Image (cartoon, rainbow, N blue to C red):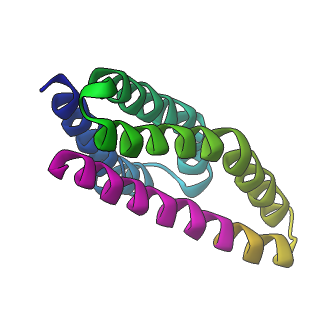
Amino acid sequence: MLGDALILLTLGGMLFFPTVVAPTVFKTLPEADAGAFLRALFPHYYGFLILGTGAATLAFGLGAPSAALLTGSVTISTAAVLFLLVPKINALRDQQLAGDAEAGRAFDRSHRLSVAINFGQIALLIAALLS
């Protein structure tokens, strides 16, 4: 029960960020400010996901091993995104803004990868709820 509630809370944050926060930021702030704001916000977003899914993993424990495996996978993959992919994305974006067109293409690919991972994580959390 607690594990399900933690998943639902985490899913709510995962859906709220790209559907409400990011579009509002880009509509409200100039592009450079919007990018800086989101760059500062992303570590908190990923931290929220790590805490939510990590707590769900512990809540499921041995009582629901398949759900624990799924939520644990999201926790680990989120940490990898935060510590490996986000710094790469930030560096590529800086290079793109400095005029490096190839870095811009690499930034786009890396950003799309992070979005795809996020959608995959949503699917894993839904699967955990259904398990």
For the point 19% across and 38% down, the residue is: 8
Q: In this view, does 131 lie above or below 47?
A: below
For the point 80% across and 54% down, the residue is: 94
Judged left or right of residue 26, residue 31 is right
Estimate the x, y position of residue 127 in percent, counting from the top left.
25, 55
Q: Is residue 35 above or below residue 64?
A: below
Q: Judge whether residue 46 is colored magenta.
A: no
Boundaries of the magenta span: 109-131
For the point 67% across and 47% down, the residue is: 86
Estimate the x, y position of residue 25 in percent, counting from the top left.
41, 48
Q: Is residue 53 above or below residue 51?
A: below
Q: In this view, does 95 lie above or below 76?
A: below
Which quadrant holds residue 63?
A: top left
Number of numbered tags placed on the structure image: 0
Q: Judge whether residue 120 is colored magenta.
A: yes
Estimate the x, y position of residue 121 in percent, counting from the top left.
40, 54
Between 37 and 59, the one lying in front of the other is 59
Which quadrant holds residue 93?
A: bottom right
- What quarter of the picture does the N terminus occupy? top left
For the point 79% across and 66% down, the residue is: 96
Between 48 and 99, the one lying in front of the other is 48
Estimate the x, y position of residue 22 in percent, counting from the top left.
40, 52
Magenta span: predominant SS is helix
